[in-house]
Image (cartoon, grey):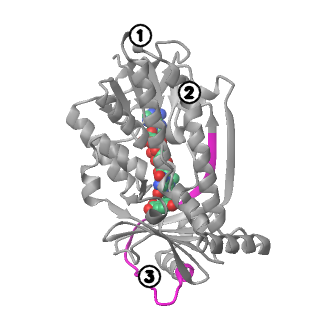
Amino acid sequence: MRTQVGIIGAGPAGLVLGRLLELQGIDTVILEARDRDYVQQRVRAGVLEQNTVDLLREAGVAERLDREGIVHHGIELRFDGEGHRIAMSDLTGGRAIWIYGQQEVVKDLIEAREASGLPLEFECSDVEVHDVDGDRPRITYTSATGEAVEVECDVIAGCDGFHGICRPVVAEAGEMVIAEREYPFGWLGILADVAPSTDELIYAYHERGFAMHSLRSPTLSRLYLQVDPGDDIANWPDDRIWQELHTRFEAPGWSLTEGPIIEKSITPMRSFVAAPMRRGRLFLAGDAAHIVPPTGAKGLNLAVNDVRVLADALVAFFAPGAARSETGLDAYSDTCLDRVWRVQDFSTYMTMLLHRLGGDPFDDGLQRSRLRYATSSEAAAKSLAENYVGLPT
Ligand code: RFL
Ligand code: PHB
């Protein structure tokens, strides 16, 4: 097989890249390790920033998002039993966020790709990349039916997530620098079959730990609790989860409605940046290159930003004759990392603002002061809001 861009991974990064290149007439093959149901059902992100929604609209894959996505103009920060609204849209000249599950974005992109009849293969195993330092890199893999396949490419996009095979290949060149932070807590996340108890997302700081109330639809709630990173979900029967949520969200005149929990899991939290995001003709995008803690709701949005930059660079790279340019590809890693670090800073700020850091009185004093400042100073609220809705690209 021969293609211009071999894309490894059918998460948001790989699928959006495939779509953007399709619209520019550039050939791609997308290879995914998991099966289609798994990819479409994985419950993860829920918040799309303004830039992401704009891009999905321009790419012609936002029809259902515009119908079913829920636009939000504010969030609530809750502490000391009181809620404070950050009026995001008012503070950012009308920018907003959309609540629309990552798996819905993925479904829409897979459907669009199918409708275009372009190659997207699930259940690929033994995926390997070769000759990335030359101008004819190759991907080899075993197909779902057990065939050994080779794809000759001009460029390979490593969109294979944090546990993928592409970042180690870039690292083998010996120049990769890893910047990393582990946090002493994780998130227990639940999906509950019950109408949300709030119209806007609530981020709560409480002496027993952080809690968040999000949603997926008018009948589906998504909630999170700060827990020990090594904690086992078996320690959390449903009534313990609800009890803890009631305690951490407690505020006069407000109550949390319980419902059947249909999914629950614990995820560790980390910050991670690998640089450069390139080796020769292999380019990393999304979680393959960086992870942010979820408190800023930014991982998927960063992945989409990476592939927006990569798609533009590839259009110039594949342009005919004298118009052909490698400048964009050469700048790719630095351009992406600039935004990655802005988002890394914002996500760390939100994380350290809202999580209980072991009960140290100095930390607690600083956090409460920062919370009061963020909710009483327009300058502080504006800084939070412009980062939350996503700085313009
Ligand atoms: P993905 O989604 O991990 O996709 C990578 C794909 O590559 C496949 N793969 C391979 N395919 C072929 N060959 C191989 N050898 C392969 N190895 C792996 C995988 O099966 C997979 O399908 O990475 P991508 O595309 O970079 O997208 C990143 C986002 O998924 C991630 O950043 C977000 O989910 C993070 N995140 C959030 N981001 C937001 O923007 N807003 C949020 O509200 C938000 N909330 C969250 C989150 C992540 C969470 N968890 C579970 C980590 C909440 C949570 C709890
Ligand atoms: C979610 O809805 O899953 C969600 C919302 C906001 C976050 C993280 C996750 O900061």
Residue at 60% of width from left, 74% of height from top? 376
Residue 370 found in image quarter: bottom right
Q: Closer to the N terminus: mark 2 or mark 1?
A: 1
Q: Indicate yes or no: mark 1 CB to ligand 1 under 8 Å.
A: no
Query: Is 282 or 192 nearer to us in this picture?
Result: 282
Residue at 62% of width from left, 68% of height from top? 354
Q: How far across and how far down the image is residue 286, in percent? A: 50, 40
Q: Amino acid at mark 2?
A: Ala
Q: Circle 3 is placed at which residue position?
A: 256
Which of discs 2 and 1 lies nearer the camera? The answer is 1
Residue at 35% of width from left, 19% of height from top? 3
- Give the crowd class for mark 3: few <14, some 14-19, many >=20 residues within 10 Å: some
Secondary structure of residue under mark 2: helix
Q: Circle 2 is placed at which residue position?
A: 331
Q: Circle 1 is placed at which residue position?
A: 322
Which residue occupies the extreme top position in the image? 321
Is 334 placed above or below 64 here? above
Magenta region: which residues? 247-273
The alpha-carbon separation of the residues under discs 3 and 1 comes to: 62 Å
Residue 110 lies left or right of residue 244; in this view the side is left
Q: How far across and how far down the image is residue 31, in percent? A: 38, 31
Q: Amino acid at mark 1?
A: Ala
Q: Indicate yes or no: mark 3 CB to ligand 2 under 8 Å.
A: no
Q: Quadrant of the N terminus?
A: top left
Is there a contact, CB below 8 Å, between mark 2 and mark 1? no
The alpha-carbon separation of the residues under discs 2 and 1 comes to: 19 Å
Secondary structure of residue under mark 3: loop
